[in-house]
Image (cartoon, grey):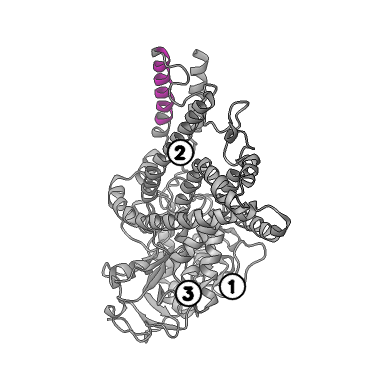
Amino acid sequence: MRKALLVLAVLAVVATACAPKTSTPTSAAAGDCTPSTMNLHTPGQLTIATGNPAYKPWYGGTSVAGSDWKSGKYTGDPHTGEGYESAFAYALAQQLGFTNDQVTWEGIPFGKSFAPGPKDFDFAMQQISITPQRAKAVDFSDGYYDVNQALIADNGSPAIGVTTLAGLKDLKLGAPVGTTSLEVIQQEIQPNVEPGVYPDLDTALKDLHNGQLDGVVVDFPDAFYGYADQIVGQFPPLSGGQEQFGLAFEKGNPLVSCVNQAIATLKSNGTLKQLENQWLQTDASVPVFS
Amino acid sequence: MASGSGPSPNVYFPPGGDSDPRLPPGSDSRWPKILGGGDSSARNVWIAVGSTVIFFGLIAVIVVRSPGWPEIKDSFFNGAEFRSSFPVILEKFVRNIFIFCVAEVLVLILALIIAVLRSLPGPVFTPLRIMAAAYTDLFRGVPTILVILLLGFGMPALDLQGIPDNDYVWAIMALTLVYSAYVAEVYRAGIQSVHPSQVAAARSLGLSRWQSMRHVVLPQAVRRVIPPLLNDFIGLQKDSALVYVLGVVEALNKATIIQQGDFNFTPLVALSLIFIAITIPQARFVDWLIARDQRKRQSSAAV
């Protein structure tokens, strides 16, 4: 009897993998921003997480040998330094004092960027819009890109020629899950037809080309990459204020302050603006929905 | 009693020594019941209660005192998030119910046809038997989510007149194809469990092959496999969530939308609770059916 109880107790402990992991984050003093003393996931390496596939124009170039990413018509490889986010990542790493080969990329499903607990990376860079709700789960860096949204459609779609938000209400639109694009559909258009919500951009585009969707909402720079025949129009900024992309860190990670300093420098010395001009096409002449 | 002596269907029975393998753990004294664990004297009941409380209590204490618990609690068991997401997810769950109910009806019909085809005797029907076998091999072999992706994105792309481009159609079609393969095997096991002497008897009474299948074999076969059929139905209900990959905004998709919008996993927990709430009563119902079947068998065997 006593033995049986003991066995049960041991089982209970084993079942919960008892010993708490001793992962006390090495709390570097704030303001101490050199790679050797920074709070890093892997010492001496800046580990950045993003999605796989990684889409143009955020990631581009031709796949590097040995990389998990595959460059294609719509996709790129973060290791190339081509595409806005990839170029930004390497500029940021340099600003922080890393060399290019000290940057490691980690492919993650989107959910991992905000899952609680220790992370397998230093921060996630995946066109993540900063919102107050999300900031409860992660720490965001300062914004590194102001993003607007646009509607793309194929020739023959009833969306072609529409100029008002009201005119979009009765169309079947789609967007990937977890994006500002989806928010625009839900909050700004408030359509009468339920939008299609897809695990990623790829599947949304597939349904667009199959004729199951009248249009897909994408980040404005995405609209210029031939995902669809036409850019129908761009959306006015969200009523909640200008949407910005931020880097997502584990809550309380002291690395944020170092990264913010670096972002501020890249902003003030014009690097970010130059990368935008180089990698992100936008066209002010695209009509804004009224 | 003839009906109990056929070859045992090999689909779902637990390994059970020399007692009837169709017994679920619990209706045979050699298998302990979940609660009590044997004879139910007061002392044993108290021991059962005590060990249960200690066992789960220890686990709870260790989990709650783990360093990550406050974070886990906030992002998986967040009260405010639960209250705001549960009703919206439940509302979309109606679509899952629609999908798995329509699919189940189609599955029961298609699978029966396949099982009967595969059980047809005689050399003439070899091509039909091969077809049925190939079908079950194919659709039991390919992961459900792949079938959904391939049909859902492939078929509308054919751009053929008359091929529907509605996501629901292809979601239901994919689930039907996959689950028919499993259910056909369950039916076939049932058909094979009817002793050949019954067919011989039916034929000697002048019934045709088809008539003996229809009036003698199938009624017994189907009744015998109702519990495993229900098990597969439960599986189908859960897999209805997979159709989110086609952009159908059903419960899982809705939960993911909230999860990724708010960076909080509570909506996924809320959806799990909905699934548990509908599947557990069915699982208990299956147990009850098996137990009832067993009681009947025992009482008729005693006559």
Q: Amino acid at mark 2?
A: Val
Q: Residue at x 44, y 39 (%)?
A: B283
Q: Amino acid at mark 3?
A: Leu
Mark closest to the chain's N terminus, 3 or 1: 1
Residue corresponding to mark 2: B286
- In the picture provided, is A19 more to the left or to the right than A128? right
Q: Is B106 in front, or is A162? A: B106
Residue corresponding to mark 3: A275
Same chain shared by disc 2 and disc 1: no
Q: Position of residue B140 (x, y in %)?
A: 60, 53
Q: Does dot 2 land on a helix, a strand or a loop?
A: helix
Quote the CA–CA distance across marks 3 and 2: 63 Å
Question: Vertical placement of B15 versus B45: above or below?
Answer: below
How many other residues sit within 10 Å of disc 2, few (<14), some (14-19) or many (≥20)? some
Q: Is B221 in front, or is A48? A: B221
Q: Chain of mark 1?
A: A
Q: Position of residue A219 (x, y in %)?
A: 41, 72
